[in-house]
């Protein structure tokens, strides 16, 4: 397992932009969930009800959100992808259920969770994580016309295998022939 450091907590610049946004959604959700737990504990203590449960649930759910963002950022696997989809879907359902109790926060939760699902469901993001859903073409196709780096320039290196990347103008992305993935 990888050692946690600042270099692998921040979204990898080689991720598609949609993945970077979803990672930040999970990180922001972790912070907001923790603050919500603290707020709930303060309100419970105000009325003499304790509040340890609110803080504990805030810590647990914040850890889950942070863990999902960390998985998406550091492990390009189908497991990381599906964990993120399931957590976003649960957030969407939770917001849908609470629509009548707290309409404003529920609408914000629906929008954020729905947007995260939309971003992750895009075909090139699925291809990035090696996920295929029914009805979609194979996730990664070899490039039709790959162009090496310009004369005198060294091509960027693959963040996974370290091999040279080739630029594919059709997708405006870099491709690793060894890993068969786009960056």
Image (cartoon, rainbow, N blue to C red):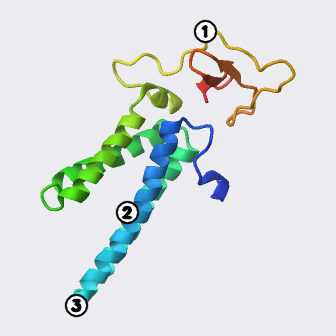
Q: Nearer the viewer, mark 2 or mark 1?
A: 1
Q: Label 1, on which residue?
A: 144
Visible in this render: residue 180?
A: no
Circle 3 crowding by C-alpha within 10 Å: few under 14, some 14–19, many from 20: few
| Residue plotted at (27% across, 87% down) | 45
| Residue 83, image quadrant | top left
Distance between mark 2 and mark 3 Cα atoms: 24 Å
Distance between mark 3 and mark 1 Cα atoms: 68 Å
Residue 173 in the image: above or below residue 102: above
As drawn, the residue found furthest toward the right would be 152
Q: Earlier in the sequence, mark 3 or mark 1?
A: 3
As drawn, the residue found furthest toward the left would be 100
Q: Label 2, on which residue?
A: 61
Q: Nearer the viewer, mark 2 or mark 3?
A: 3
Secondary structure of residue under mark 2: helix
Residue 142 in the image: above or below residue 110: above
Q: Label 3, on which residue?
A: 48
């Amino acid at each position: 397992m990888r050692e946690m450091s600042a270099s692998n907590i921040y979204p990898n610049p080689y991720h598609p932009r949609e993945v970077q946004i979803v990672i930040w959604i999970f990180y922001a959700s972790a912070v907001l969930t923790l603050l919500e737990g603290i707020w709930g504990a303060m309100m419970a203590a105000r009325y003499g009800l304790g509040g340890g449960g609110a803080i504990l649930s805030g810590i647990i759910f914040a850890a889950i959100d942070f863990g999902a963002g960390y998985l998406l950022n550091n492990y390009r696997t189908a497991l990381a992808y599906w964990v993120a989809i399931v957590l976003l879907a649960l957030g969407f359902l939770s917001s849908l259920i609470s629509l009548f109790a707290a309409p404003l926060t529920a609408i914000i939760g629906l929008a954020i969770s729905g947007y995260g699902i939309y971003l992750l469901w895009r075909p090139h993001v699925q291809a990035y994580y090696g996920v295929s859903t029914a009805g979609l073409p194979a996730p990664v196709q070899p490039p039709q016309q790959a162009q090496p780096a310009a004369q005198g320039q060294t091509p960027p290196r693959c963040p996974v295998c370290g091999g040279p990347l080739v630029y594919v103008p059709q997708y405006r992305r870099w491709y690793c022939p060894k890993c068969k993935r786009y960056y």
